[in-house]
Image (tube, rainbow, N blue to C red):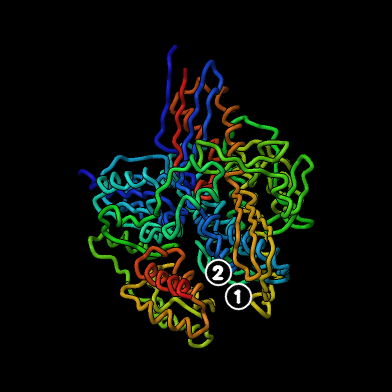
Amino acid sequence: MKAKSIKVDYLARVEGEGGLYIKVKDRQVVGFKLRIFEPPRFFEAFLRGRSFREAPDITARICGICPVAYQMSAVHAMENAFDVKVDGPLRALRRLLYCGEWIESHALHIYMLHAPDFLGYADAIQMARDHGDVVQQGLSLKKAGNELVALVGGREIHPINVRVGGFYKVPGKRELAPMAEKLKRARDVALETVRWTAKLRFPEFERDYLFVAMRHPDEYPFNEGHLVSNHGLDIAARDYEKHFAEEHVEHSHALHSVLRGAGPYFVGPMARYSLNFDRLSPLAQEAARQAGLGPVCRNPFQSIIVRSVETLYACDEALRIIDEYEMPESPAVEVQPRAGSGFGWSEAPRGTLYHRYRLDDQGVILDAKIVPPTSQNQKVIEQDLREFVPERLDLPADKLRWQCEQAIRNYDPCISCSTHFLKLEIDRE
Amino acid sequence: MAKKQKPKLAVWKFASCDGCQLSLLDCEDQLLPLTERIDIANFPEASRAVVKGPYDLSLVEGSISTPHDAERIHQVRRASKFLVTIGACATAGGIQALRNFIDVKDFISIVYATPAYIDTLKKSTPIAEHIRVDFELRGCPINKEQLVEVVSAFLQGRKPNVRPHSVCMECKRRGAVCVMVAHGTPCLGPVTHAGCGALCPAYHRGCYGCFGPMETPNTREMSAAWERLGVKQKDLVQIYRSFNAYAEPFYSESRIHESKIHQG
């Protein structure tokens, strides 16, 4: 029998180092491994013995793309442990900071990491030679997101202004005014982005996913809410570990997550959107409808449109927050540590990010558990490819390889988070 | 007429959070003009196209923490004419160098259920401990304007204008109030390398050392000043042990306070 193997040195345009191995026999995928060989960094181990105050700054270093997500999940878990409530303008400012990260991270993925696949370019720089205005548009959107993070957080990557209980310094209302003008332009660009991505060509590929995302009584979820699914799950953060399990597999430095009794599940923009369409702003809902999206999206390739809708929402929401903002009297509420456990989660650009800490009476971390979005999505990515590949085995090797990469990039995988470069090997017998 | 070939840039990743290489993509206004001057030949986070080496300029992010990476960094050096390390992981071992103070086996079993699957080195070490490095750009994360300066300096064949003085100088230039003198807030600014623009003091917060030690820092006097503000020995150990824990002056200073704890 003729054996065939295809190798690519790495899957690019993802954050982190990983590899993909697919073995095909009689038109069936018989062997599959999404390998993650990003070197482990042991955050959960060295957090032990550190002060609760350090958790937002230390965990931010897990990911340079979504540090705000780590900071938010960490502060919420700590505040849960110490029974501290952060409300009013401080809560609004956290939401504003998160809007900035969604805009920055989504614009990066839409324009620089994902769109080149749809148009057949190796990267956004090559794409810019033929679509200069489009790439410029994406960069301007990304810049607006970064400027918002820097304004509230101090800098784009690893912001310095977040602390348990609130912030070190809060902006005055007048300081936010120039940002509102920039965000109005960004909102126009985001709306144009939804229209532009809707015109891309998408492979026919839908699956009946188990979606999991946070849900809040009256907001599109960032920092607060229950975790829900399209199959009846509805839990508070403290019950997360009763319902979800992590498995350690040989070919990966990232732990795989499963929902007990149900198996693999999907987190991230498409899950969030499909479970929270009714919580989007009227502008974002209308844009989604015009783009041809229903209230539920099951084609992961269309996640690029969903990200655009979420980016539009984040601009809209940021403008609402700035409009209603009144500077709080104090930049933070007082925090008194006490012994116990704290549970927190938030919606990172790539999906739900769970933190749990056990602390002593001085607020020293005794143990920590962090479950990032990409480790939760690994099994779903594997399942997608198991279905995607057999239908396309007649494609030329290079084209098949590229489409597999694209199918993985649908998830905007952040391998640095989950524990870079994906190596793709397809063995055909 | 034959077009002059543009210099080739490569970006390499080792153990890191991707934030420092992201800084290159975060140069939203400079990115496309930059590509007119330089050919981004190998940058997996941004492109699936790989142009073969050798490369004129390599930017290296991340620390060495696995046997495989300890080999790979030598290949990167051989393929690079000029090599710059970017960020605290590459220049000091990063936050993951906290393993250097304990037995890494304990760390593995805390995070992973099946430790036998994990292949890692006992220490996380800076790139310069393994190969010759032409320039080190500090920060956790690096400052993107400094990154543009380093790349521009390379293109113009001159030395990068990156000052090795302390955060205090930036604080004064910015006109920020000294948080340590005015508010009694412990601040690492006097011993920390400049580059952030004195961000934390401007946000009424003490510097926590993202850019690592400045040139010839007086950590002894720094610690004494912190002690006068009531900071305990165990907290002094922690403050030097973060993103630049394995940078020599911070490493030694944290060891001093650790031994003071043990002496009781």
Relative depth, front residue between A414 and B185: B185
- Does the rendering let one see residue A412? no
Element assignment for label 2: helix
Relative depth, front residue between A28 and A108: A28
Element assignment for label 1: loop
Left or right position of A61 against A88: left
Q: Residue furthest bottom?
A: B182
- Residue at x 34%, y 53% (from the top left corner): B59
State yes or no: discs 2 and 1 in contact (Cβ < 8 Å): yes
- Does the rendering let one see residue A71? yes
- Identify whether B7 is placed above or below B135: above
- Residue at x 61%, y 32% (from the top left corner): A383
- Residue at x 33%, y 55% (from the top left corner): B127
Q: Residue furthest front?
A: B263
Name the chain under label 1: A
Q: Position of residue A280 (x, y in %)?
A: 72, 53
Toward which corner of the image does residue B253 lie, by quadrant? bottom left
- Residue type at the position of mark 1: Pro
What is the CA distance from the residue labelled 2 to the residue labelled 1?
Answer: 8 Å
Circle 2 residue: A151
Q: Position of residue B252 (x, y in %)?
A: 37, 69
- Identify whether B136 is placed above or below B164: above
Circle 1 residue: A171
Upstream in the sequence, badge 2 or badge 1?
2
Name the chain under label 2: A
Q: Residues within 10 Å of mark 1 (few under 14, many from 20)?
A: some
Toward which corner of the image does residue B25 lie, by quadrant? bottom left
- Residue at x 57%, y 22% (from the top left corner): A391
Q: Position of residue A43 (x, y in %)?
A: 52, 55
Relative depth, front residue between A377 and A289: A377
Say which quadrant the N terminus of chain B sits in: top left
- Identify whether A384 is placed above or below A89: above
